[in-house]
Amino acid sequence: MHILSRTQQIGASVFGLTLSSIAQAHSFGEPYTLPMPYWMYIYGAIAALVLSFLILGFFYRAEQASRPHKQWPIGHPRLFKFARAIKLSTLLKSIVLLSFGLAIVSGLIGNQDRYRNFNMTFFWISFALGASYLSAAFGNWYQYLNPWRVMLAPLKRFSQGRQTYPSQLAYWPAVGLYMAFICLELFGNTKPFSLSLILISYTIINTLAVWRYGSQNWFKYGELFSVMFQLIAKMAPLHYQPSAEGKYKLQLRMPFSGLLEQRVEHGSLLVFLLFMLSSTAYDGLRETSLWFNLFWKDPLHILEPLLGEHPLYAYLSLRPWYIGFETVCLLLSPFLYLGLFRLFLWLGKLITQTKLSVSELALRFGYSLLPIALVYHITHYYTLLLSQGLKIRGLISDPFGWGWNLFGTAISGRLPVLPDMGFIWNSQVWLILIGHVASVYLAHAEALRSFPSQRQASLSQLPMLLLMVIFTGAGLWILAQPLQG
């Protein structure tokens, strides 16, 4: 498989080869000369984590961790009154529904060139990536603009459900759908027509699930984007607080503070969260030369004796097996992370001699990993949003790829933003560091609430600090690796 360099990826459309190209905006294909040796970045990041841990251990107290986090009301009442007067909510819902409807229709009857069809860029880039970042910035907007919820909302009796949602299902339906979504993204080689069929199928799944279990239950536990965007929205600086009058107040808070004093509801939600982290890390790893060479260059000489020839000469016949191998690795990745997470929690339990079970500790400390999952996602994909996502401006003028220019942006609107390579690397390093420091803080705050003394809380976090160091080093290492050649 030909893999584009990062410079080529930024300048070219992501859908020119296969859908898995969506993952290729996170690493350098052509060697990029770092301003400092790589080991200095690692040592610097580790030093920052250790320093933040020491500061929290000496100065952050249990009474501070137990205080409710501050929130400040924002927005003038006249602004909300104006929004209601122009029916902003109805307008936004209509735009979302029309966008998804256009994506389905354009895929069915439009040009099948991935570069020119509206639906590929809209769904995989503007929605799947862009909506995640909107949730990180503006909170759980998706709860109100979910296109499938909006579509079924008028059918009130239909949306009430026919059966109580089984408690044992918990968030497992969302986990399964999320895994299928990532498999399609990385290995599906989706085209506009097949993407439309997938969106239709997903609409049918949601409709049947709402009919059986009700809108409230399904969009809380089963619909993958509802679960994912809700988790991301917990870290947002904006929060929608319901008032006694049945309206919503907009409040400002510190980033990541929405995770304080919360615990993961169920083990299945923890697996979902860990898959957010592991799938992004694995996506970065599988595009590196190291990963490619481990299989296709057969350094351990395992495949060549079985095949009777070097694996590269049997590329066409081995390719489906390689995809299967990658898929299995992807699906196992969250459980590998879960085992690693539980191991370090067990070490903390061993040090502190706490009576809390490892399972209970995993639920209490699970949300401390969310900032890492978010920054991994941003560092790996934000250049793709700038290079390909912004082309949606031009595709709106020609959604079917028929040569239209409805709004005069068909040409100019396809110009990407090309970030400087140095800016990309430095921003990625800072994002990874900020995410891990936030995770250290959240874990320490939870430790102060979970353990009876300051000393026990600090001791319990020594294994977690080591885990954060491992994640930081691994994240920076993956970003610094060259892509497959």
Image (cartoon, rainbow, N blue to C red):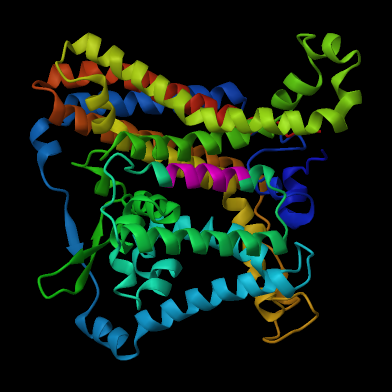
Q: Quadrant of residue 111?
A: bottom right
**Residue occupying the point 73% across, 78% down:** 410
Picture coordinates of residue 23 (x, y %)?
Answer: 64, 44
**Residue occupying the point 69% across, 63% down:** 416
| In the image, residue 332 above or below residue 91 | above
Query: On the rendered structure, is 397 left or right of 69?
Result: right
Q: Which is the main secondary structure of the residues drawn in magenta?
A: helix
The extreme front residue here reads 162
Q: Is residue 182 magenta?
A: yes
Q: Is residue 396 magenta?
A: no
Nearer to me, 310 or 462:
310
**Residue occupying the point 71% across, 33% down:** 323
The extreme bottom residue here reads 85
Segment colored magenta: 174-183
Picture coordinates of residue 167 (x, y %)?
Answer: 26, 43
| In the image, residue 60 above or below residue 193 | above
Q: How many marks overall?
A: 0
Looking at the image, can residue 55 be seen? yes
Picture coordinates of residue 184 (x, y %)?
Answer: 63, 47
Looking at the image, can residue 484 be seen? no
Query: On the rendered structure, is 327 left or right of 154?
Result: right
Nearer to me, 459 or 123:
123
Picture coordinates of residue 240 (x, y %)?
Answer: 25, 64
**Residue occupying the point 33% across, 22% down:** 464
Q: Quadrant of residue 41?
A: top right
